[in-house]
Structures are given as structure tokens and as C-alpha cells.
Amino acid sequence: MPALPDEITRLLLSWNSGNEKALDELMPLVHSELYRMAKLYMRRERANHTLQTSALINEAYLRLVDQRKVRWQDRAHFFAVAAQIMRHILIDHARIYQASKRGAGAEKVPLDEAVVVNRQRASELVALDDALISLADFDERKSRIVELQFFGGLSIEEIAEVMRISPATVKRELQAAKLWLRRFMTNS
Amino acid sequence: MMTPERWQQIDALLLAALERAPAERASFLDEACRGDESLRIEVEAMLSSDDEALSLMDRPAFEMAAGLFDDGKPELSAGQNIGHHQILLMLGAGGMGEVYLAQDLKLGRKIAIKLLPVDLSFDEARLRRFQQEARAASALNHPNIITIHEIGEFEGRHFIATEFIEGRTLRQVLQHKRLSLPRALDIAIQAASALAAAHDAGIVHRDIKPENIMLRPDGLVKILDFGLAQLSNPQSSTSDTEALTLDRVVTTPGLLMGTVNYMSPEQARGQRLDTRTDIFSLGVVTYEMIAGRPPFEGETASDLIAAILKVEPPLLHDYLPDAPTDLQRVVAKALRKDREERYQTIKDLLVDLRGLKKDLERTTTPSAAATATANGAAISTDNRASTATAASGIRTLFSIEYLTSKLKHRKAAAAAIALVVLIAAAVIAIALLRHPGPKPPAAHFQNVNVTRITTMGNAHSPAISPDGQEVAFLSSDDGHENLWIQQVATGSRVQIGPIGKGLEYGGLTFSPDGTYLYFVGDGDESDLRPTVYRIPKFGGPVQKVIAGADSSFSLSSNGRSMAFLRNDSSVNNVIVANADGTGERQVASRHEPDFFWAVDPSPDGARVACAGMRRDSKDLGAIVTEIEVNSGAEKTITVQRWRWIEQVKWLHDESGLIIIAQEKEGSDLQLWFISYPDGEARRITTDLNNYSNLSLTPDSKTLVATQVSPVVNLWLVPDGDASRAERITSGPGRRDGMYGAAWTPDGKIVYSSSASGSVEIWMMEADGSNQRQLTSGSGQTHSLSVSPDGRYILYVADHNGNRGIWRLNIDGSNPKQLTEAGAAPHCSADGKWVFYQTMEGDKRFTWRVPIDGGQSERLTNLPPDTLGFSPDGKLAVYIHSQDQTKKRLAIIPSEGGEPVGFLDLPPSTYRIQWMPDGRSLSYVDQQNNNNLWIAPLDGGRPRQVTAFKSSGVLFYAWSFDGKRIAVSHREIINSDVVLINRVK
């Protein structure tokens, strides 16, 4: 049962006007809806092979937020929250997946290639999440930019809006962040 | 560890360097990092990966994670029902949907269920096309094609139920090793044979790859997913688009790499496909099996496609220096980029592959061939042929397996019959100990000559023409039954062609005028029951004679009447009809557990001889009964009983009958003469072959039959892992372990073998080496076991006519008779006693005798049907009760008392043994091709250990450490037609 658009819209506006507590209330509401939709999208993906994070989050946004009451910048902020939530959803899932596929006997069952690919992806995702946490220790901005792009599917312009920096800076920061992440992940 | 200050330094330099052109970066860093070499190294290391973009983040996380979602939580869970299938567990998931192991609740078998993607339901055209193909594929009925049981829909979800194959995909095998050339060729041949059958039916697989080729532990290859390639393409609602297009591959990086490797050039181009695409893909698979790597490689999907379209693969010689030149030619021809230059039909490729294999066998020395087998390639052409022929209609299998395989036709009676036969299996070996030998010989068929008249190895079901000049027979080729006519005098023969139906029961029968051949084949859409057909001797349209025949059928020699059996629920009826199928009437019937198996009308049609199983207060066995057609009066003809009677035929003058029968467990199906009317029996043939499909000339002078040479070998299953099973004995005509096998505490195997001409006890190492004979003249040896201290072998034998339980020193010395009766001897845990069993009625009782000999005593504190003791000797297991749904075992203290636990097993289980760890029981399940299972005593789910397709496990024995299993398994090596003449 999705939360009422009114409530989510109110929380979003409240948060955007500086009320950090509103975010705490907003997150779980968006989380359950995003989780539900993510599952739906994943299943749909297998048949048509098109999958866009931004489309998913946009759909959630349209469902959850009353469009008449918000400015376009609020949409970017919604996306920023959604990116963080998506990160949790996906990483949790990757960890569960890893754990479940390591279970006794799992290796003996004939699996098809997709499962092997998934197993590899799950560990890549978890490794990336670990690297992002390390990066955030000394450069939170870069970590956040990566999160917005990779987990939230935000465009450079949307990231610039959320982070209140120029698109050119977003690009450079992303590039440097990726170089660092790569170095971190190959070394660890 | 990097400090925030250090990172700020690096970050600043990184950003500054990124602002500059790559060529300028080095001089910039020279300047900026002056005096701090480690800083420069760090920044350069990061920059060096610049051109190699972080591939991980090319696509948003959400896309990468696709698939993790569904796989983490299966859509179906254990215990859930889909129609009459109960989900047991999820086997795997992928782009084509999820695969589950399930139990078919109706037929009590394990099946695999593939749940198709949910969106399929929305694409009617694609769904319909898939269903058409899957149905067509399911009709192929080829041993190398996975059997599709059902294509169904459940609550809006489409699924396919298929046979459950325990084994590994070729992909999994290739990950571990490159295959030996003979093994690779064998797999390619089996795959090509499957594709040939599919192509004949107009079905193109489109997605041949190692993931779709399943290898069973017994060596049989199964091709999966016919028709499924249709599903993988979402845009293919029009008929001319194909499974994979270049566009889709390129836009889905990584995801389809596994499949791209095996695409044909025309597939990569998105062109319309025909059967030749499968030829290319099989060529790729064959190349990879031999070379250990695929012929075309590329970093990305587009590179790979470019290679498929343009690059010639390296010569096989590069990987396998002694590869025959013909091999290179054959594989290269399959891999021609222009399909017009490729093999045009899969059959041409199949013929060449077989030729290669034959050449290889000719040039390989016997020892080299033996090594190839021992190296885990536990398969030979023989093995394959055996499975193929067995699956396609040779009916001379070990009768229990034969019966089991036929149970599907005797649905209602199935459980009861299985029960009866398994009791027979247990009972008769023991009961026969007390039986007198065969009666003295009668005059007829004193001497016969048996001449093999075919050498094809797959010939069966012969019929001799009324004038005795011709023999018609069938050969099983790639799932078809081909008809041949051979001249008896000259041996020349012509192939008439496929008979157009699957053979169900029995062989061919000539019409009295010699112009038609009758047989019992698969039913058609109007009537699914097995049906009697006839076809003109030299080919022509198949004509339906009469439907609903659940046995072979026979014509009277005056040509006026026919007889056959028909099952109706649990009742088994003898039907007599006019030769044209009219005037049908029922003349006798049997209720379970009794049943008939074979019938033959007397020459004048007035009586019918019926062979079948009868159970009475004493025991159970096969007999021949005569039934008066007009009155229905019955009379038993035979005096003795057999374990099984396969066929019965009257002699023309009614002076007697010929039967094909199995005397006791483990013995062969041989010809016997029964005098009429006094019913005395005498064995006609005395060899180590099995006979079936007997046909006589009207003067009874000449007989033809199928002769099958079975071989029983011992296999070693390490760590309970059947996929690593290896055959450890081999050799022509071997019967190793056919009457039992046991381990010594130090890991040697004691087994019965006929290698020296008679059945004796042998011993060898667990790898099959150092085989040595321990006994001679022991006669009818069976039920071997070894005492836990390793000092003695206990067995049942007939040393110099002294039948009973014997004890032998482990080195083969000092045979000592302990009892004059009994079976299944086992030493007690403390080594002091020998437990054994006797039969009274259908109950078995446990006795004990001191290991050094002496007075036997019956253990009256144990209930009847006690099967054995736990390894520590503290517990015993007995059959508490059994019905058609289960066999309930109870565990009790070995000194007797109330049950401490129960275990329910399928009713079709036998050879129940306690596992060495004391925590589980193992058993053989007849309903499942006599495969070995383990059931934990704590009530956990039983686990299947072996996965033999036919015949299965005859005997098995656990090593003392419980890690290894010695299994005896029967294979059919050759099936040919023999002519049997009476010698005056």
C-alpha cells in the first residue's frame, strides 16, 4: 500500500526547506515503494531487456509526489533520496544473493550462465559499495556524486542541481572518483 | 592507509592532470611532484587506468543487479503445487526463467519444471510458436533429447515439465578439463544424432551450446531446450526474425557472451535460419571440446561476432598435435562461414563423425582404449548403443527392468506388480535354495544349433516367414525402427525402411500367407493405447488392426485367430479376436497380484497358452496356463516355476511349447521346452545370452529370436558422487558383481565374476587392478559379505553339491560350510555370529550360527522381515508394513522390543542396507530405473545417488568408511538375430 502522495510531498518540501528530520520520515516511505517497483521492473526486464533506473525512479516520483505542489528542483532532490535508497536495496540484495548462493549444495546444482553472471555481479556490487564507503571517509562529495549517478541514474545536470555545483565540476569529480575507485578495488 | 591530507594532495593533482591532454600529463607531474616520488607513482597509477573506463559503472547499478532480484527469491517455494507437480527445490534461474525440481504426484517421479518468463503470456504469437515447437520436440522421442512431459499453464504462468536429468552440463565439464578425443567424438555423435531427429521433424534448435548439452553419469548425452530459443527474442513475433540479432547482442554487452560464442554467421547477421545453423554451432562445440577453447574469441561481443564472420579458427592440430587430418577436415567443414559450403545436413556430419570414431577405435591399441575409459570417460560407444537400443525397443532386458519400463502401460496395476516383482526378487533367490533341479529331459529339442544371422548389433524383433525362407527384423537407428528382409539361404538382405510407429510390445509376426507383418506399436491420436498394426512385407502404408493391446500378440498358425492381453484397471484380460480384428472377446482375466504377460493361441485356435505370474500360499513364480477359448476352462500346464516367463509358443503338433524364461534371479532369459500335456521342462539353450521375440515356422523346425549379450560390470562411485562413477571391470562377456559384491575393511572389493567361465568369488583393488580368483567349483555363488575384522568372506554357494552358507578365509583358503540353508549371510559386529535369513511363505526370518560353525538358532525376538542390523549391532530394521503407497520400516533394538522409529520409503524399494555411519539407510528404487538412494533415519529427504538410465543397480556395497560404493550395473552390448535349428 503506497503512502499517500500528500504526505510524501509534504515531507519532501519540508526537507527541501531545511528540515532534516523530514528526510528520516521520507526514506522508509519511499523505500517500500521503490523496493516494490524494483522487483516489478526486474521481472519485466528479463523479457524486454530494457531497464532504466531513471525511468523507475521517475515512475515512483510520479506516483508518490503531487506534481502540482513541487518545483522541478524538488524532483532532483527526490531522486537524490531515491539514489540512496536504491543503493541500500541493491547492495542488501547483492549481499543476500551472495550468501544464499554460497550455501551448502548450491555448487552441485547445474546452473545456467545467468546465475554465474549474477554471482559475479553481486560481488562486484558489494566491492564497489565497500570502496564507496572508504571514499566517503575522506571525500564525501565524490562518493555522493557516484551514488547519484550509479545508483540513482541521475544525469550530470541533475547531480549538479542536487549538489549545487557546476556540471563541469560534476564531470571532473566523477572521473577522479572512478579512477580512485578502480585503484582501490584492484588493490584490495 | 591514505590520510585525508594525502588524498587532497592526490586529488588536486589528479584533477589538474585530467584537465590536460594525456601527452602533457607526464611533464606536468614531473613538475608538480618534484621531490615526492611516491605521490607521483600514486597519481600515475590512477591515471593509467583512465583509458580503461571503470567498466563496472558503465551501466547503472540497477541494470547490473537485474536478475539478482528474482534469483534471491524463487517465485515458487518447496511444497507448493503446480497442477499435480509438487515443487521440491529450485535448481537454477536465468534469462529463460526458473527451473525447479518437482515431484510428479500422479506418477511418483522426479521431474524438472521450467517456469517461463512472465511476459511471455503477453506475446501470444511468440508463445504459440514456442508451444508448437516444444510439442513437436516432445514428439521426437529420441534418447538424446530431453523428454518433455507437459507444456502447461498454471495461474497464468506457462511452464514446461521435463524429465529430470541428474548430471552436468557440458559447460561444467569443460570448465574442469579438456575432453579426450574419443569422448568428445562420442558427445558430438550423440548430439548430432539428436539434431538429426529434430531436423527430420523440421525443428531447428538455434541455440546449441555447452549449457544446453547435458551429460549424464552413465554417458548418455541429452540436448535441452528445443524450441526455447524462440523465446529469447522479444521482437520475434514475426516469423522471419531469429533468436539473436547482431543489434541485440551489441546493445547488451556481456550478458549474452556465453551464447555469442556458438552463433552461426547467419545468426550473427540476423538472417533467417535453417537447420545448417545447428551444424555450425555443433561444430563450435566440437572444436571447443577437442581444443579446450572455442574457435572464435573476442574481448567484446562485437569482436567475437567479427571473428565469427571473418576469422578462420586455428587448426586443431595446434592444440592436439596428433589430431587426425580427417578430424580437421570434418570440423572445418562444419564451421564454414558460408552455409552453402558447410555440411548440408546434420546426417552427413553424423556419418563423418562416426567414421572418425571408428577410425580412432581401429588405430587405438586396446590398452590405450582401456586407459581412456579409466580416465573418467566412463562411456564407450557400446554403452551409448546400449542405452539407445534399450530405449528404442529391444525387449530383452533383465526382466525386472523390462517390467518396470513397461509399468507405464499398466498404470493401475503398476504398484501391485512392482510390489509383486520386488518380493519375487527377494523371495525366489531364497526359495530356490530348496527347489529340486529341473526334471529329466524330454525327447524334443535335445540339440539345437544357434547361428547368428546379423552382426549389426542393433537388430531385434525377428519373424520368420511361413515358408522359412525369409527373416524380417528391425534395427534401431537414431530412434527409428527400420524394417529389413533377409534371405535365410543367402544372407542377403534389403532395408525396407522405417515402420512408422514406435514399437511397444514384442516383435514382428508374419501373416500366414507371408505378405504382411504385424506388430504392436504406439497408438495414434484417435486412440492412445498401444495398437496392433500391419504393414506389407516390402513396405507401404501402416494399417491399424486393433487398438488396446498391452502385450505382444500372436496369430494362430491356421491364420484365423489372434490373441493378446489388454489391461483394464487392475485387471489383466486375455483377448481373442479374428485375424482381421473383428469378433473380439475376452476369454480369461487375472486380478493383481497375479497377471499374464505373454499369450499364444494353439495352432487350431481352440486354446490359448498364457504365461504369467501366480502367487499362492507357498511362493510366487511364473507359470504357463492353458485356457479353453470356448469354455474359458483353465489348466496349469507347467510343473515347475520360473522367476519370469517372457514368451510362450506352441509347437505345430501341440506336442509341447517353447518358452523364453528366466530360471532365477540373475540367470538369463533362455529357451526352454515344455512337454504337453505333462508339462515337464527342459532347458534348450545353455549360454550366457538373453533371448526374446521368438518366432517359429509352421512346422516348428526353424526358430528365430533376438539374442542380446548383456555385460555386468562393477563401477566405483567415489564420495557418493555418481558423476564421478568409473567402471572398474571390463571385458567381453563379463558378469562382474552380478551376484554380489562386498568390501574388505582395508578397501579391497570381493565380488562374484564369471570371468573364468563359472561364477566364482574374486577379489581386486578398488581401482580394478590385481583381479584374482579365490574360489573354484563353488557353484551358484551369491550374497557375498565380509566380516568386519576382515578375516572371512561369507556367501551362499553350492560347493560340490553342498548348498548352504559358506565361510571362506579372506585369502581364498579353507572354505567351510556353516549351514545347509539360508541366504543373505552377514557377520555380527563383534565377529562372533553369522546372521542369515530363511523364507517361510512370503516372510523372512533371521537366524544365527556361530562363525566357527555349530548349531543354528532362530532369533525369535526379532519380527519377521527383519532386513539387517545397524553397523554397531545395536539396532535392527524390519518391514513394519507395506501397501501400494509406501513401505514402512521400523527400527527396533537388536534384542527385540518396541520400535524406536519409523521410516517410510516408496513401495518399490529393495536391497535396503544400513549405511556404515549408522545414520541412514540406502536402497534401490525400482520405480526409478533401479537407482540407488539414501534416506536419512532422521526423516530427512531421500537423496538419489546413481542416475543410471536403464537397468540400473543390480547390487551395491558401501566401503567400511562409507565413502565409496561398488555398484554392479548391467549393459546391453549387442543385439542380433539368431536362427535356431533342431539337430536330429
Image (cartoon, coloured by chain):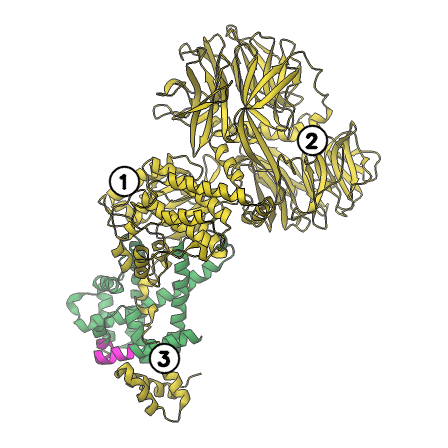
Chain colours: A green, B yellow
Q: Amino acid at mark 2?
A: Arg
Q: For the view shown, which residue lies furthest in the left direction?
A: A68
Q: From the viewer's perspective, is residue B533 above or below residue A32?
A: above
Of the image marks 3 and 2, the number of the one nearer the N terminus? 3
Residue B844's disc is 2
Instruction: Give residue B811's position: percent from left, percent from top.
Output: 78, 44
Q: Nearer the viewer, mark 3 or mark 2?
A: 3
Quadrant of the drawing holding the N terminus of chain A: bottom left
Q: Secondary structure at mark 1?
A: helix
**Type of the residue with mark 1:** Arg
Horizontal side of residue A64 vs B793, given as left or right:
left
Tag 1 subunit: B
* Residue B218 at least partly seen: no
Residue picked out by circle 1:
B128
Quickly name the residue at label 3: B46
Badge 1, how many Cα within 10 Å: few under 14, some, many 20+? Answer: some
What's drawn in magenta, residue-wise?
A: A160-174
- C-alpha distance separating marks 2 and 1: 57 Å
Q: Quick one: label 2, few (<14), some, or many (20+) residues within 10 Å? A: many
Report in which chain the residue with disc 3 lies. B
Residue B976 among those drawn in magenta: no
Label 3 and label 2: CA atoms lie apart by 80 Å
Q: Quadrant of the C terminus of chain A?
A: bottom left
A169 part of magenta stretch: yes
Exactly how many numbered labels are in the figure? 3
Residue B628 in view here:
yes
Is B34 left or right of B950, judged from the image as shown? left
Please determine whether, in this image, residue A155 is positioned above or below residue B452: below
Q: Is residue B323 above or below residue A9?
A: above
User: Magenta region, mostly helix, strand or loop?
Assistant: helix
Question: Which of the 4 image quadrants contains residue B72?
Answer: bottom left
Q: Secondary structure at mark 3?
A: helix
